[in-house]
Image (cartoon, grey):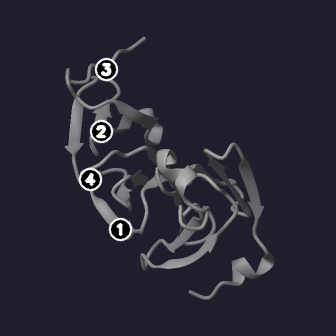
Amino acid sequence: IKKIDMDYGCPKANRALFGPLNKKLIVVNEGGGLLGYDVASGECEVERCDNEMEIPDLSFSHDQMTFIVACKDHTATLYDTHSMEPIKKYQSDRPINSAAMSPLMDHVILGGGQDAAAVTTTAGRSGKFEAMFYHKIYETEIGKVKGHFGPINSTSFNPDGRSFTTGSEDGYVRICHFDPEYFSYDQ
């Protein structure tokens, strides 16, 4: 077992994923940090702090050439895996807990919503619990899918790109299948 030591006092790691060929380990943390470790040496090669709030999620594109992070500061950022430099930033009106990229379309899905502690005092609509779709290149919101009545904490595209899932604090996982019209969407 190889142990990678993170600095004492460093914010808690929320997610860690192996990069291409398992040579790099990419870690996101509660302090908004993004860290890139060399797996062989255990050394931190890249340390970025592009966000001021917690990053709860990280996911790769199907080819692992890019990855997206979701942040509580109402943004999701697309990064180049090799350089770990930001490419695109998606701005929302709510905290983002999860983000994923379509393997077929130039689309990203973001999920989040109002903090769970405040959910009981507001209606589902005002909690902003919809899954939001953005154009990956143009950074514009292209649609929303309603259904949850609690914050969305997990989003994922099916590897075939024909459906997606969302998981929420309301206790439900929703599997949504795209209509044929989705695939002819004219950007």
The answer for how far apart the CA atoms under marks 1 and 4 are is 13 Å
For the point 28% across and 23% down, the residue is 42
Provide the secondary structure element on which disc 1 rests: strand
Q: Is 103 on the left or on the right of 27, as rendered? A: right
Q: Which residue is mark 1?
A: 88
Figure quadrant of the N terminus: top left
Q: Amino acid at mark 2?
A: Gly
Provide the secondary structure element on which disc 2 rests: strand
Q: Which residue is mark 3?
A: 4
Q: Which residue is mark 2?
A: 36
The answer for how far apart the CA atoms under marks 2 and 4 are is 16 Å
Q: Which residue is mark 4?
A: 51
Comes first in the chain, label 3 or label 2: 3
Q: Residues within 10 Å of mark 4 (few under 14, many from 20)?
A: some
Comes first in the chain, label 4 or label 3: 3
Comes first in the chain, label 2 or label 1: 2
Q: Residues within 10 Å of mark 2 (few under 14, many from 20)?
A: many
Residue most extreme to the front: 121
Q: Amino acid at mark 1?
A: Lys
Q: Amino acid at mark 4?
A: Asn
Q: Is 4 on the left or on the right of 111, as rendered? A: left
Pinpoint residue 118: horizontal percent, then vertical percent: 48, 50
The answer for how far apart the CA atoms under marks 3 and 1 are is 29 Å
Provide the secondary structure element on which disc 3 rests: loop
Residue most extreme to the top: 1
The answer for how far apart the CA atoms under marks 3 and 2 are is 11 Å
Figure quadrant of the C terminus: bottom right
Q: Amino acid at mark 3?
A: Ile
Question: Mark 4 or mark 3: which is in front?
Answer: 4
Pinpoint residue 142: horizontal percent, then vertical percent: 55, 79
Give me the disc on residue 116. Answer: none
For the point 27% across and 19% down, the residue is 5
